[in-house]
Image (cartoon, helix red, strand yellow):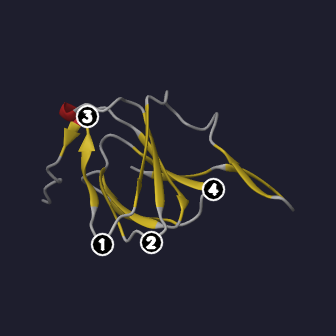
Amino acid sequence: MANIIDLKTFTDKRGNLTVIDKIVPFTIKRIFYIYGVDDSKRGGHRHHQTVQLATCIQGSCKIFSTNGQTEMVYELNHPNQALLIEPKDWHTMYDFTPNCILMVLASEEFNETDYIFEPYTKG
């Protein structure tokens, strides 16, 4: 199941520096970011192989995640936290603030055959 990871942050009078290294449990093969989102939902899928680490480097959004047994809603609202999304986690992103920039690190390059769009069925 998806889980929040605290990112190492150094703070002093000059500001904050957040580091993403030695914490990502996969080799990064793709980086993308989502911004300028209206009231739409993004995502709506899970993967066969891809693991993702998502963080709002500005603003906030919510991510709904389910592995078919457990459902959770995570609010990403601080750039020193990230959500690790496993391949089995069907997820949607929503409630983006107008200034939100959601950055995602992925374990695989884009491959349309890696996507599973059908949600889990209940029962």
Q: Report which residue position mark 4 lands on.
A: 80
Which residue corresponds to the image point at 27% horizontal and 64% vertical from the top-left?
Answer: 41
SS class, disc 3: loop
Q: Quadrant of residue 44?
A: bottom left
Q: Report which residue position mark 3 lands on.
A: 48
Q: Earlier in the sequence, mark 2 or mark 4?
A: 4
Q: CA distance from mark 3 to mark 2?
A: 30 Å
Q: Nearer the viewer, mark 3 or mark 2?
A: 2
Q: Amino acid at mark 2?
A: Thr
Q: Amino acid at mark 4?
A: Asn
Q: Earlier in the sequence, mark 3 or mark 1?
A: 1
Q: Earlier in the sequence, mark 1 or mark 4?
A: 1
Q: CA distance from mark 2 to mark 4?
A: 17 Å
Q: Earlier in the sequence, mark 3 or mark 2?
A: 3
Left or right of 98? Residue 59 is right
Using a 10 Å C-alpha cutoff, classify the residue at mark 2 as few (fewer than 14 neighbours), some (14 to 19) or many (20 or more): some
Residue 13: horizontal and vertical position, in percent?
Answer: 87, 62
Which residue corresponds to the image point at 32% horizontal and 40% vertical from the top-left?
Answer: 87
4 and 3 marks in contact (CB < 8 Å) = no
Using a 10 Å C-alpha cutoff, classify the residue at mark 3 as few (fewer than 14 neighbours), some (14 to 19) or many (20 or more): few
Q: Nearer the viewer, mark 1 or mark 4?
A: 1
Q: Quadrant of residue 119?
A: bottom left
Decide: is 94 above or below 20. Answer: below
Q: Report which residue position mark 1 lands on.
A: 39
* Residue in the foreground of this view, choosing between 91 and 19: 19
Q: Report which residue position mark 2 lands on.
A: 97
